[in-house]
Image (spheres, grey):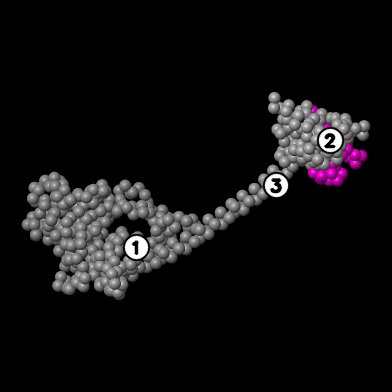
Amino acid sequence: MEKISLSALVASLAVKSGCTAAESESFVKGFFNVISESLEAGEAVKVPGLGTFKLVPIENRKSVNITDGSDITIPGHNRIVFVATREVAEKINKPFAIFNSVELESGIDESILNELNVEKGEREIEEYENNIPTNNIDEDIKEDSQEIVGSKDVTSDTDYIEEPVDSLADSVCQKNSSGRWKFLVGFACGLLLALVVSLFLYSYFLSDDASILGNLISKRENKILIENGESHLPDSVIPSSNIQEIKSDTGMPEVDTQPSQIIVYDTIGAHRYLTTMAQDHYGNFNLWPYIYEENKAFLGHPDRIKPGTRVVIPSLQKYNVDAQNPDDIKEAKKLGYEIYRRYSE
Amino acid sequence: MDNKKFIDRLSEILDIDKSETDKLANDLCEIIVEKVAEGDSVVIPSFGNFEPRKKMERIVVHPSSGKKLLVPPRLTISFRASGNLKAKVKYEGNNQEKTD
């Protein structure tokens, strides 16, 4: 924003009107002198092409002396106010002329109101009737008081200014709290939803098998397989007459281990490994290599078996293994190492 | 003092015809308004300055109908009197003692 000096103004006038510089200068000075004169005499002035300069009386105001804290009264005085003519105002507002006031729905979101100033409409409307000025007064009041004493009581001078300020404060407070409240409710709902979803997912992934299908099938199968119910019982599920026969899927190797044709299946899961199965079926997790060996045709690296892979749980008798025999456990361990060694080459 | 009186007074002081002062006054005002519209402030020593001001949009409640209006942002011209002038007009009558 540039500052146009008096001389610049004078020069522009001379150019525009065609008068001399001296004439222009005396005119401009005279122009403003007349206005000052009138104001000094206590009379408002209407200047064509500009607006009205007028005096507004301001009442006494109690305040505090900043230096010693003593009470002070700011005496009543006059303040100068300028109100532009409608034409001038429109000219200045030209860039924003395309915008018009918009009537708001009654159910407008109150959060919008938080950000905007809310004022009594009366003042807004009267402004155009060339009466009560708005911003000017508030600013001048602040300036005024600071000049004298630097008072903290800056808000109001006359009644009609005080009113809107109070209502503004009230309305802003109210709208603030209700907007905030709505936000909190929304946030709480979102949090609750997230909690429910995570619980759901958690339960899913914590289940024995990662794949949903595998989960369903294996559960059903395990139920059928094991009379005792749960497939993760420590007691080994050794093929016994309790176990019923099951049909196997096509493509899955069926091993005829017993004359009684009992086939035990289990499925690799996110938390169900060969060791887990060995623990469950044999009672000792170290016996996992036998499960591996039984299914090695389609198993790759023992640590990288895809969840959902169904394996046959052979009977330990097939491998001449006794779960209780510590030597057999040692053997099993050795077999485990051997299996790993196959993949390290 | 209304417009007419102002022009009269001005021509009186400057000793120029009224039509002349009228024209000059118009020209001067046009220049001032133009400058402010361009975003510059016009400073008159011992008088004050004219500045452009931007006002934010706001919601206005029509007191009688209770309707809410959204008033868009606006540019206005604002006048700030100089200390000199303010002092002159502060108290009614020049002879009054000031209590500063």
Residue drawn at the location 81% of the way across and 33% of the way down: A331
Q: Amino acid at mark 2?
A: Asp
Q: Is residue A61 left or right of residue A326?
A: left
Look at discs 2 and 1 and give the one toward the viewer.
2
- Look at the numbered disc 3 and give the secondary structure of its residue: helix
Q: Amino acid at mark 3?
A: Ser
Kindly identify which numbered label has been placed on residue A203. Answer: 3
Residue drawn at the location 30% of the way across and 50% of the way down: A93
- Look at the numbered disc 1 and give the secondary structure of its residue: helix
Kindly identify which numbered label has been placed on residue A328. Answer: 2
Residue numbers of the magenta segment: A226-252
At label 1, counting other C-alpha atoms closer than 10 Å, the crowd grade (few under 14, some 14-19, many 20 or more) is many
Query: Eyeballing the image, is B44 above or below A160?
Result: above
Residue A274, picture quadrant = top right
For the residues bearing labels 2 and 3, Cβ distance under 8 angstroms? no
Can residue B73 be found in the magenta stretch? no
For the residues bearing labels 2 and 1, Cβ distance under 8 angstroms? no
Looking at the image, is mark 2 or mark 1 earlier in the sequence? 1
- Look at the numbered disc 2 and give the secondary structure of its residue: helix
Q: Quadrant of the C terminus of chain A?
A: top right
Regarding residue A222, the answer to whether it shows in the image is no
Residue, disc 1: A123
Q: Nearer the viewer, residue A97 or A273?
A: A273
Residue reaching furthest to the left? B15
Helix, strand or loop: magenta stretch: loop
Residue A253, picture quadrant = top right
